[in-house]
Image (cartoon, rainbow, N blue to C red):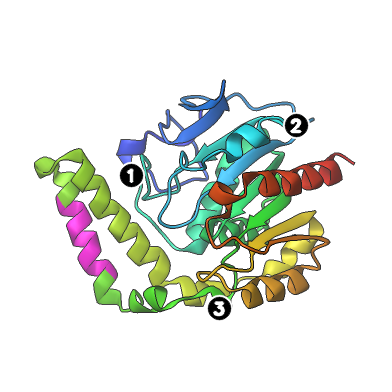
Amino acid sequence: MSLVEEADQGDTDPAAPSGVGTWLYCYTDDHWESCSQLSAGDGTDPAILLVHGQPGSGRLWGALPAHLARLGKVYSYDRPGWGAHRTSPGDLRYNARWLCAIADALGGRVVVVGYSYGAAVALEAIAIGCSAIQGLVLVAPAANELAVGPLDRAFEPAWISNSTARAAAWGASGRLPGRLERALLSAHSLAVESGSLRGDLNGLRNSAAASVPVAIVAGLADRTVPPSSVSLLASALGAEEVRWSSTSGHLLPLRRPRLVAESTAWVLRSVRG
C-alpha cells in the first residue's frame, strides 16, 4: 500500500492516501529512515507509532526509539505543517484524521505513543472511531483545559493565524531559503493548533479511549502540563498504568526513555493478551 501523499503537493485529504511521502519514518538499524512506501501487514502484531507534540518532528525522540525497537516495529511521522510534511496545518480533529489514515496504512493494528499535544491527537482519533489504534501510551499528555497555557491563549485571535498563513504562503513561493520557509510554516502550524486548542480540548471525548489499554507517563516537575491535568485525565480514562517521574519535567521522551518504554511494553502485553 502506498502511504499518504507527496509531501510537496499539499493533499489535505487523509482519507485517500496516494503517492509517496517523505515525512513518515521507520526506525531501522538504530536510526530513522524515510518510508517512501509501506506494505500493510497482516495485523497479527501491533506496530508502535510515535506522534509528536508542538513544536516537533517525527525524528526528534532521542533514545526512545532504540528502547522501543526491542518491543516491535517502530514508526513515526511529521504531523501536517511540521518537519517535511508541508501539508497545511489544522485543528485537533484534522490531525486525528491523519493519524487514522496512517494507522490504517500500517496494517490497521497499532499502539500509539502520543507526546504532549500528540496524546490529544491520539485520544481524538479514538473518539472519531479509529479502530486501528489498539492501545495508547500518553506521555506528558496535554489533553484537557488545565494543559492550555498562556502561549496557547495568546494565539487564539484569528488575525494571528491569518498573518502566519500569509507569511507561510510567501515562504512557499520560492523566494526564501528552505530553512526559513520551514520556520514560517512551523510558526503557522503552532498558531493554528494553539489557537484552537482550548476549544478542541474542551470538546475532547477522551472517555472513548477507555475501550483500549492506556498507560500514562508524566513528570511531577512538568510546568507545561501540570500534574493536576494528568491526574484528571487518568481518572477520566480509568487508566490502570500511571507512572510518575519525581524529577522530570515535560521532556520525558528525552529524559526518561526507559520509563516510557516500560509503559509501552505494558500496553503491548495487554493488547496481545
- Residue 85: tell me if it is visible: yes
Kind of element beneath mark 3: helix
Q: Say what amino acid the circle numbered 2 marks.
A: Gly
Q: Give the total of numbered labels.
A: 3
Q: Quadrant of residue 19?
A: top left
Image location (x, y in percent) of residue 236: 75, 73
Q: Nearer the viewer, residue 23 or 142?
A: 142
Image location (x, y in percent) of residue 105: 60, 35
Q: What range of the chain is rendered magenta?
A: 161-170
Q: Nearer the viewer, residue 86 or 181?
A: 181
Q: Nearer the viewer, mark 3 or mark 1?
A: 3
Q: Which residue is mark 3?
A: 145
Closer to the chain start, of discs 2 and 3, is 2
Image location (x, y in percent) of residue 74: 62, 33
Closer to the chain start, of discs 2 and 1, is 2
Quadrant including the N terminus: top right
Q: Is 166 one of the magenta-colored residues?
A: yes
Kind of element beneath mark 2: loop
| SS majority, magenta | helix
In the rendering, which numbered label is found on residue 86?
A: 1
Q: Say what amino acid the circle numbered 3 marks.
A: Glu
Q: Is 182 one of the magenta-colored residues?
A: no
